[in-house]
Image: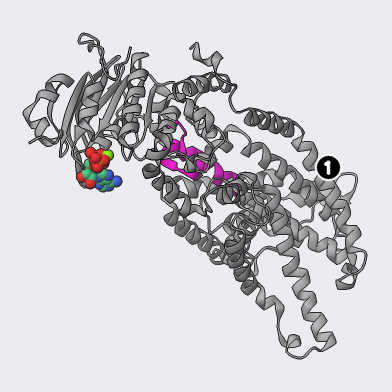
Amino acid sequence: MSVVQDLPTPGGARGMRTRASAFGGRHRSLSITLGMALVAAVLPVLAGVPPFSSFQPQAAWIDGFTNAGVFVLLALGLNIVVGVAGLLDLGYAAFFAIGSYAYAYAASPFGNQILGINVQAALGDAAGLVFWPMLAIGALVAALFGVLLGAPTLRLRGDYLAIVTLGFGEIVPIVFLNSDAVTNGTNGIGGIYRPYLPGFGAYSATNPWPYYITTVAVVTLVLILCYRLVESRIGRAWEAIREDELAAAANGINTVTTKLLAFALGASTAGIAGVLNTAKLTVVSPDQFTFVISFTVLAMVVLGGMGNFWGVAVGAFVIYTINNVVLKSLNQFFQSVGVPILKDIDFLQLQFLLYGLALVAMMLLRPEGLFPNSRRTRELHADVVPVEEDAEGEAAAGGAAGGAGEGGR
Amino acid sequence: MNAATAPAPAVETAAAVLRLSDVNTYYGAIHALRGIDLEVHRGEIVTLIGANGAGKTTTLRTISGLLHPRTGTVEFEGRDISHVAAHEVVRLGIGQAPEGRRIFSRLTVVENLLMGGFTRSAAENHEQVEHVYALFPRLRERAGQKGGTLSGGEQQMLAIGRALMGRPRVLLLDEPSLGLAPILVQQIFEIIGEINARGMTILLVEQNALQALSIAHRGYVLQTGHVVLTGSAHDLRENEMVRKAYLGES
Ligand SMILES: Nc1ncnc2c1ncn2[C@@H]1O[C@H](COP(=O)(O)OP(=O)(O)OP(=O)(O)O)[C@@H](O)[C@H]1O
Ligand SMILES: [Mg+2]
């Protein structure tokens, strides 16, 4: 087509952006690794100096950061499902439970007996070696359940999917609770082996550092994979489905497998988080996986900025730390100082009130989250139309009438 | 040559690229298409006209795999695609600009176009985007603008452009003129004619029967899920019933 030569090059700015992001992509893994290393190095230092050291000892901080890391993993996984692919999953804790129990079966005398294996006899003190392959196996098992749940339900539209996942999230812990013979019911499975690293030995309850470093490494890896994914073809397909499923299908996207993949990958991340968490707690029981977990992780994703992995990671970390360190410390602080009224408030009980308030405030003030996805910022602030999703739909529809004047000249 | 005002003669002898035989499509218990027979030949513009709810959109959806016929067959280039999934139909070579345009409102124009080329390689898309811009220079100007903030006419251009990105051999258009001012309707129809003149086979659903029949080679009139009339565009324009029901003459 000869016309092509006569026309200016397509959107110069866009071209530059494409190049810049390709550049970023190649170095993304490196910058994530460096960023995570930096954060991982700075946090313990901060924890060792006032005012932070006055809250709790450094070792307790490190332990708390590790637990926060587990929630960061959960939030990253749920972000794929909810933030990127736009599928509302209200029962995400189920996959966390599945990963946790998977590790318990592979790495405890009780679990081994059920499976008919004996890791301890084979490996002795190094029984915790199973931790490493279990990171992958836990991910696979959770992904498998993700597919089993997703295959029949992902054809459902949004609200129905939310309800089905909500049910699944309730059913899984109940199954673990009631299958006494194979799960030990309410008491759960104890005596789970701590990880064993060749050349270092077994992790211990008294030294939080090995867990901390392991968690940082796993989070780093998952973050890199998340970015790789959203920048790939499959990432574009998720985006299309989130925007308009029918249009996505009409453009050649296999919506069923694409959604299933988001579901399975989200589940596998929760599986990894479960393995990690259980290897640290050394005990797993059904009451660890209530709806509260699903809700907390969802709040982390929304507050952190749906779709943006860094934002979600930071959001999860901050929320967890506020919940489990700051609120607890406030209790102790006001009690020890004896401030009237304040000393009688249990700030931990206020957790959900605070979530609720934060979510409402966020939707009013910064619907894109604290650390939004760059595209969403553009959408929500840079335009003529002061938009939320609904307003946008109207803008699109209203455009039909407005088109006459504008396009007709 | 302006295809919009002077349609090329239909190729009567050409084999049907698209053939629907006794197609019955349901929405649950609702029997929407009641034995549709329809053919589209290579290089043609065929228009499907009819009142609201006649089954025009349903026909397109049945072809594009968004719906599947309960009985009857849809053949594309001799292959039975009655039960092929929508995303596969795109790969086979049928593109569509769906009813209501359904552009990705939060993606930019160029991102929308690239989404249209999802089944194609980056290199192919790079080239095809230029063809689309050549057809719709307006889209190039708006390349970085969010789809949802485009005017109705621009959105329609984007919907057609996006469908072309998949390099289809048959293009399905569902009411491209809906909600557009008369001058813009004229413009869209001219572009449709131009796309056809370059060799694209088009199945065009329209309420705007007069315009549609002026660029089409042949047409089908749908009523409550039946084909009640078919013929050359010229004959249909002259037809008493069509003039009364769809051309607003008494
Ligand atoms: N999703 C649906 N569920 C149930 N019935 C439907 C659905 N979509 C369409 N129908 C019914 O099928 C019939 C044909 O609808 P269709 O959308 O094909 O009409 P149309 O000719 O495209 O009309 P219009 O000109 O208004 O777009 C109508 O009776 C309609 O009510
Ligand atoms: Mg219709």
- x, y percentage for residue A359? 60, 65
Q: Nearer the viewer, residue B79 or B187?
A: B187
Does residue A87 appear left or right of residue A311 in this picture? left
Answer above or below: position of A383 versus A48.
Answer: above
The subunit letter for the residue under badge 1 reads: A
- x, y percentage for residue B211? 24, 28
Does residue A308 appear left or right of residue A336 in this picture? left
Is disc 1's CB within 8 Å of ligand 1? no
Could one spot residue A278 in this view of the protein?
A: no
Q: How many marks?
A: 1
Q: Which residues are magenta?
A: A243-267
Answer above or below: position of A71 versus B194.
Answer: below
Residue at (47% x, 50% y) in the render: A392
Q: Amino acid at mark 1?
A: Leu
Res B18 → quadrant: top left
Q: Nearer the viewer, residue B112 or A173?
A: B112
Residue at (18% x, 27% y) in the render: B220
Instruction: Point out the residue furthest to the top here.
Output: B13
- x, y percentage for residue B196? 33, 17
Position of the C terminus of chain A by quadrant: top left
Residue at (67% x, 48% y) in the render: A309
Q: Nearer the viewer, residue A188 or A27?
A: A27
Could one spot residue B2 in this view of the protein?
A: yes
Label 1 belongs to which residue?
Answer: A34
In what quadrant does ligand 2 lie?
top left
Q: Main secondary structure of the magenta part?
A: helix
